[in-house]
Image (cartoon, rainbow, N blue to C red):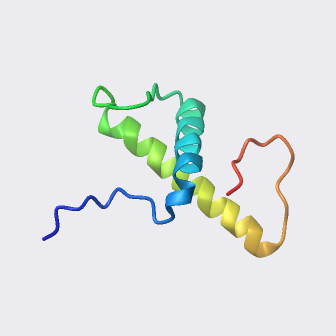
C-alpha cells in the first residue's frame, strides 16, 4: 500500500481554482472554513462542503453537455 495521499488535484494547474471554489461553497453553506488546518470542524461540516462541491460540478457539467447556459448571477463557479 502506498503512503501517497489520494487528496491531490488531478490537474495541478486547477489547484488554486479548486481552493477558491471550496471556500465559496463553504461560505454559501455557512461553514467557517479557514486556510490551513480545520480540525475544529465536524465531519458533517467538512462532508457537506465536499458533497456540495461535487453537486455543483455535476450540475455545471450537465449544463455544458446540454448546451444550455447558466443564469447570470447564480454564483456557480465556472471551471
Q: Which residue lies furthest to the left in this view?
A: 1
Q: Residue 44: x and y, percent? A: 35, 39
Left or right: 1, with 42 as reference point: left
Left or right: 56, with 38 as reference point: right
Q: Residue 30: x and y, percent? A: 53, 27
Quadrant including the N terminus: bottom left
Q: Which residue lies furthest to the front in this view?
A: 13
Q: Residue at x 46, y 66 (%)?
A: 10
Q: Which residue is drawn at 60% across and 37% down?
A: 24
Picture layout, residue 36 above or below residue 55:
above
The answer to which image quadrant residue 74 occupies is top right
Q: Which residue is drawn at 75% across and 68% down?
A: 64
Picture layout, residue 1 above or below residue 22:
below
Q: Which residue is drawn at 59% across and 48% down?
A: 17
Left or right: 55, with 59 as reference point: left
Q: Residue 39: x and y, percent? A: 28, 31
Q: Depth check: 50 or 38 in front?
A: 38
Amino acid at each position: 500500500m502506498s503512503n501517497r495521499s489520494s487528496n491531490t488535484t488531478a490537474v495541478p494547474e486547477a489547484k488554486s481554482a479548486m481552493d477558491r471554489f471550496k471556500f465559496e461553497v463553504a461560505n454559501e453553506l455557512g461553514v467557517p472554513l479557514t486556510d490551513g488546518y480545520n480540525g475544529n470542524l465536524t465531519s458533517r461540516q467538512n462532508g457537506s462542503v465536499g458533497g456540495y462541491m461535487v453537486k455543483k460540478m455535476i450540475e455545471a457539467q450537465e449544463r455544458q453537455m446540454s448546451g444550455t447556459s447558466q443564469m447570470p448571477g447564480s454564483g456557480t463557479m465556472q471551471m
